């Protein structure tokens, strides 16, 4: 008989998945809005409820979800955080493969510190790969919430997803405080907007939106490839949630930039957001590049950076002719 798929509700099934998951906690935040509370410590190390710290919420979530392989990435004023983790979270059993390791920023890839959350993970990708996890759970170390990550990881596996994002419903009026996702009725993400003024709301519920919680589940192999491509893209923000979705949103709303009257330069040639959108490599991005370029030209962009100059010139000429700004090179066909 064919093997039946395990159910996400099975405790043993979920336990196997969480046991093979590595949690990577981003704990380098400055927490500037907390002012004096973070004058001498990073935001995740801020005291909360007496002897506890903000990072204890996400660490507790991990341990109680059965995730006991945890890497904490630090950068800004980390000594207080390091001491707290060493003194308060040293009970995990190393002989069983359990650990919580604190990984300081080490300029692994050159004379640069972490340039964003994605870059922080990329600079430590060799460490992550060395642990050989089946899945990587990327978390923020300065969020306060309670959650069992097991069902989310099980859902990720059952759907065959490459990336799964944790979201929460919030009032639409608060959209300027969150990254907002748009999803189909089958929970497939179709759009991401960073703190939009006019967000996409839930179907039939115009008062609610889906806000990103900063929780990401990745397949390990995909994570390595995506981060390598992101690191090579000088125009990237090197931050989760601010690249492909952001680039698509900027392209759609390019008219708002051109409406200012200033000349707008567009650089979409062979970019990773084209490759990720179409699922193609660098050498197969010409069609997507020309499509994005045509949209930008229609919306008023005036300067274009291109690798394939002749093809781009033709695309721009065609857009100009469709808009009525350029006559055809020749028009010899008869009219019926």
Image (cartoon, helix red, strand yellow):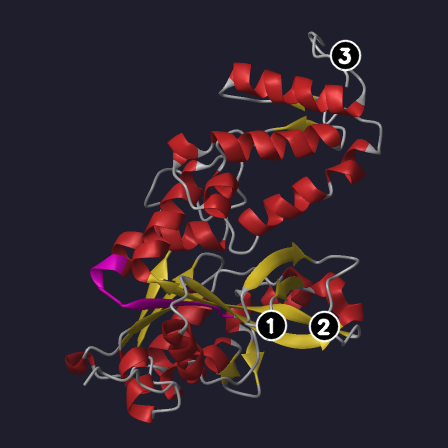
Q: Secondary structure at mark 2?
A: loop
- Mark closest to the chain's N terminus, 1 or 3: 1
Q: Is 238 part of what is drawn in magenta?
A: no
Q: Residue furthest front?
A: 336
Q: Is residue 112 visible?
A: no
Residues at circles 1 and 2 in contact by the CB criterion of under 8 Å: yes
> Residue 193, image x and y in percent?
66, 56
Q: Quadrant of residue 231?
A: top left
- Cα separation, mark 1 vs mark 2, equals 9 Å
Asked whether 181 or 124 is in front, the reply is 181
What residue is shown at x 77% (from left), y 70% (from top)?
172
Q: Secondary structure at mark 1?
A: loop
Mark 2 lies on residue: 203
Depicted 294 relative to depicted 279: above or below: above
Depicted 176 relative to depicted 262: above or below: below
What residue is shown at x 67% (from left), y 77% (from top)?
169
Mark 3 lies on residue: 327
Where are the magenta residues, as a range?
Answer: 129-141
Q: Nearer the viewer, mark 2 or mark 3?
A: 3
What residue is shown at x 30% (from left), y 82% (from top)?
5
Depicted 257 relative to depicted 83: above or below: above
Quadrant of the rendering where the C terminus is positioned = top right
Q: Secondary structure at mark 3?
A: loop
Residues at circles 1 and 3 in contact by the CB criterion of under 8 Å: no
Q: Quadrant of residue 174?
A: bottom right
Left of 161 or right of it: where is 6? left
> Residue 129, image x and y in percent?
25, 58
Mark 1 lies on residue: 185
> Residue 212, image x and y in percent?
59, 67
């Amino acid at each position: 008989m064919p093997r039946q798929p395990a159910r996400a509700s099975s405790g043993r099934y979920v336990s196997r998945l969480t046991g093979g998951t590595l949690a990577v906690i981003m704990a380098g935040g400055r927490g500037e809005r907390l002012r004096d509370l973070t004058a001498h410590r990073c935001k995740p190390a801020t005291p909360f409820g007496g002897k506890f710290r903000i990072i204890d919420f996400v660490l507790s979530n991990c341990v109680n979800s059965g995730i006991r392989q945890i890497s904490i990435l630090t950068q800004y004023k980390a000594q207080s955080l390091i001491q707290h983790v060493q003194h308060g979270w040293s009970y995990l059993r190393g002989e069983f493969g359990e650990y919580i390791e604190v990984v300081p920023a080490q300029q692994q890839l050159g004379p640069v510190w972490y340039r964003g959350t994605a870059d922080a993970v990329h600079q430590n990708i060799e460490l992550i790969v060395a642990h050989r996890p089946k899945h990587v759970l990327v978390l923020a170390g300065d969020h306060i919430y309670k959650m069992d990550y097991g069902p989310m990881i099980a859902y990720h596996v059952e759907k065959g997803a490459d990336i799964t994002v944790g979201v929460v419903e919030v009032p639409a009026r608060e959209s300027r405080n969150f990254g907002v996702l748009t999803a189909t009725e089958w929970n497939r993400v179709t759009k991401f907007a960073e703190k939009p003024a006019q967000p996409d709301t839930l179907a039939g519920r115009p008062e609610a939106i889906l806000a990103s919680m900063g929780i990401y589940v990745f397949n390990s192999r995909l994570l390595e490839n995506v981060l390598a491509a992101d690191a090579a893209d000088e125009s990237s923000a090197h931050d989760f949630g601010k690249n492909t979705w952001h680039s698509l949103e900027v392209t759609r709303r390019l008219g708002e930039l051109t409406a200012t009257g200033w000349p707008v330069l567009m650089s979409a040639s062979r970019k990773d957001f084209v490759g990720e959108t179409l699922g193609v490599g660098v050498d197969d991005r010409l069609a997507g590049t020309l499509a994005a370029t045509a949209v930008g030209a229609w919306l008023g962009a005036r300067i274009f950076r291109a690798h394939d100059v002749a093809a781009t010139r033709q695309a721009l000429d065609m857009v100009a002719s469709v808009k009525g700004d350029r006559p055809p090179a020749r028009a010899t066909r008869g009219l019926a």
